[in-house]
Image (spheres, helix red, strand yellow):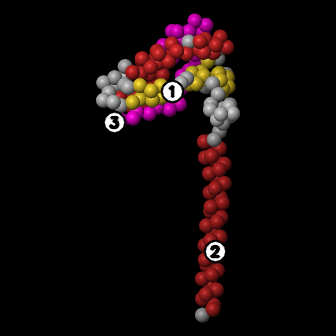
């Protein structure tokens, strides 16, 4: 009888040991591969308030550094909406110091152009992911038409939300 009890204790011990090994190895790979990718913050900085700073040095697709300018969040009612609200966070990339300065002085004009452009889109258009590359290109052209000292190199949409009533 004691022999059967010892075998079951040993069996439970082996099972627990295997589970611990799988857990440790799995945790290592999750930490090494997944979390490293998710929390890759190279080039990102936060100020003391925990908010993103307006100017961030990052590399674009060509490897040349650009400065990121975060605009105020945009909240609007899309065209023909029934009370739906569209919200998005936009970041502009500029490579020239003159453009960066001009973006600061023309902030209100830029926000107006982008808000007007997006408010003319319907909820269905804003919800269609296939159309957003074209929207980004058109918004880049709109902003560049305002600038006299150069142009932005890219526009990024950090987040977009459509809230339905």
Disc 3 crowd rating (10 Å Cα; few below 14, some 14-19, many 20+) is few
Q: Residue at x 63, y 41 (%)?
A: 39
Q: Is residue 80 left or right of residue 89?
A: left
Camera-side mark, 2 or 1: 1
Q: Earlier in the sequence, mark 2 or mark 1?
A: 2
Q: Nearer the viewer, residue 60 or 51?
A: 51
Q: Residue 73 — which label?
A: 1
Image position of 124 with respect to 35: above or below: above
Q: Earlier in the sequence, mark 1 or mark 3?
A: 1
Magenta residue span = 139-165
Disc 1 crowd rating (10 Å Cα; few below 14, some 14-19, many 20+) is few
Q: Quadrant of residue 68?
A: top right
Determine which residue is flagged by label 3: 165
Could you tell me how far apart the alpha carbons at marks 2 and 1 are, in whole angstroms? Answer: 55 Å
Residue 41 spot, x, y in % from top left: 66, 36
Residue closest to the far front: 49
Q: Is residue 8 visible?
A: yes
Residue 67 spot, x, y in % from top left: 65, 22
SS class of the residue under badge 1? loop
Magenta stretch encompasses residue 136 = no
Residue 38 spot, x, y in % from top left: 60, 42
Camera-side mark, 3 or 2: 3
Q: Residue 14 — which label?
A: 2
Magenta stretch encompasses residue 146 = yes
Q: Nearer the viewer, residue 24 or 122?
A: 122
Report if the CB atoms under discs 3 and 2 are less than 8 Å apart: no
Q: Residue at x 64, y 13 (%)?
A: 101
What is the quadrant of the N terminus in the image? bottom right
Q: Residue at x 51, y 9 (%)?
A: 145
Disc 2 crowd rating (10 Å Cα; few below 14, some 14-19, many 20+) is few
Q: Nearer the viewer, residue 69 or 59?
A: 69
Residue 58 spot, x, y in % from top left: 66, 27
């Amino acid at each position: 009888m004691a022999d059967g009890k010892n075998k079951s204790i040993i069996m439970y011990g082996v099972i627990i040991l295997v589970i611990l090994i799988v857990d440790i190895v799995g945790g290592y790979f999750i930490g090494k591969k997944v979390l490293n990718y998710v929390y890759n913050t190279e080039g990102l900085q936060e100020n003391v308030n925990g908010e993103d700073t307006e100017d961030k040095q990052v590399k674009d697709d060509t490897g040349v550094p650009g400065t990121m300018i975060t605009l105020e969040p945009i909240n609007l009612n899309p065209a023909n909406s029934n009370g739906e609200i569209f919200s998005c966070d936009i970041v502009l990339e500029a490579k020239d110091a003159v453009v960066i300065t001009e973006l600061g002085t023309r902030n209100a004009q830029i926000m107006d152009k982008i808000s007007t452009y997006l408010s003319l889109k319907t909820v269905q258009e804003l919800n269609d992911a296939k159309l957003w590359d074209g929207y980004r290109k058109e918004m880049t052209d709109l902003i560049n038409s305002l600038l006299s000292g150069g142009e932005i190199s890219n526009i990024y949409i950090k987040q977009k939300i459509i809230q339905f009533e």
